[in-house]
Image: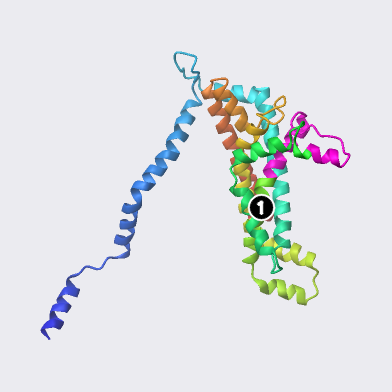
Amino acid sequence: MADAAVALNQSGGRRRRGPLTSAWTGYVLAGPALIVMIAIFLYPLGYSFVMSFFRWDLSAPSAPFIGLNNYKETFASPLFQQSLRNQLVFTAATIAVEVTAGMGVAVLINGEMRGLRAARTLLLIPPMIAPAVVGLNFRWLFNSQYGFIDALLADLHLPAIPWLSDPNWALASIIIADVWQNTPLMVLLFLAGLQSLPQEPLEAASVDGASPWQIFWNITLPLMRPVIVIALMLRIIDTFRTFDVVWLMTQGGPGGATSLVTVHAYLLAFQGVDFGHAAAVSYIALVISLLLLGILYGLPWLRET
């Protein structure tokens, strides 16, 4: 009896932690790391935004405040207009090919055939390669003198293609490089979505005599809308961040034919030494990407998600 009383007193003397106390404990433990991460993210963002309102030229003794002049000069600049056109073409072409091809390949390998597991594993390789390595590899592949692609065309008795020296082909070259690296990521994303779909509607449609195309178009594709939205959002954001591949393949040339907004901002900052103007270009690109995301969200077919 005495031992039971002692145990009862000991258990009764302990305070039970409520959910609020446990939550605050988690916040306290995670707080320092969150503060560091927020500071690392917000400080450069705020600093560059303030910089965009100044004539931040390292060759000048001071950085005078000029208001919106950097933004006005950017919109009036033919070089920025060219880079924006290139960016929109690059974004539209890469997303169209990657999403379409990614969905098609995901549907093909969504099964239990032999060798599919190895194929899915191989799909992890291109997205894991650093963009700088991808850019260097494709620069060698598309080299007009000793590149593998033109050598293969010569063996097939086809004319050589000026991949990196012709403006039209140069833009196509960076699109091909981006498609090669990012299409497997879309395949894996869509494959995960396909494997998480409920099977009952698909089986019912098959029993009712629907063709595979009808099942895909009327059942599978609508059910995949949330995954498609995520894929489109990721690719829109990522294409406006593309720099390494383009710079290492063409450096924005020839004649600015492959100059994306990131390349234009880089040239302004580190060749023109005009960091305020480069910051303005970066924020204009950010606003344009957000507008594209807003347009995407407003599409009726996707908004239903």
Q: Residue at x 70, y 51 (%)?
A: 99
Image x and y of residue 289, in percent:
61, 40
Image quadrant where one finds the N terminus: bottom left
Which residues make up the magenta segment?
150-179
Residue position for label 1: 184
SS for tag 1? helix
Residue located farthest toward the left when viewing the structure as drawn: 2
Task: Report whether 55 appears left or right of 181.
Answer: left
- The colouring scheme, among rainbow, by chain, secondary structure or one colour, is rainbow
- Please count the marks in the image: 1
Image x and y of residue 288, in percent:
61, 37
- Residue kind at label 1, given as amino acid type: Pro
Q: Does the rendering let one see residue 291?
A: no
- Counting other residues with Cα less than 10 Å from the Cα at mark 1, is it few (<14), some (14-19), or many (20 or more)? many
Viewer-proximal residue, 111 or 87? 111
Q: Quadrant of residue 176?
A: top right
Is residue 13 shown above or below 120? below
Is residue 181 shown above or below 66? below
Q: Residue at x 13, y 78 (%)?
A: 6
Secondary structure predominantly adopted by residues drawn in magenta: helix
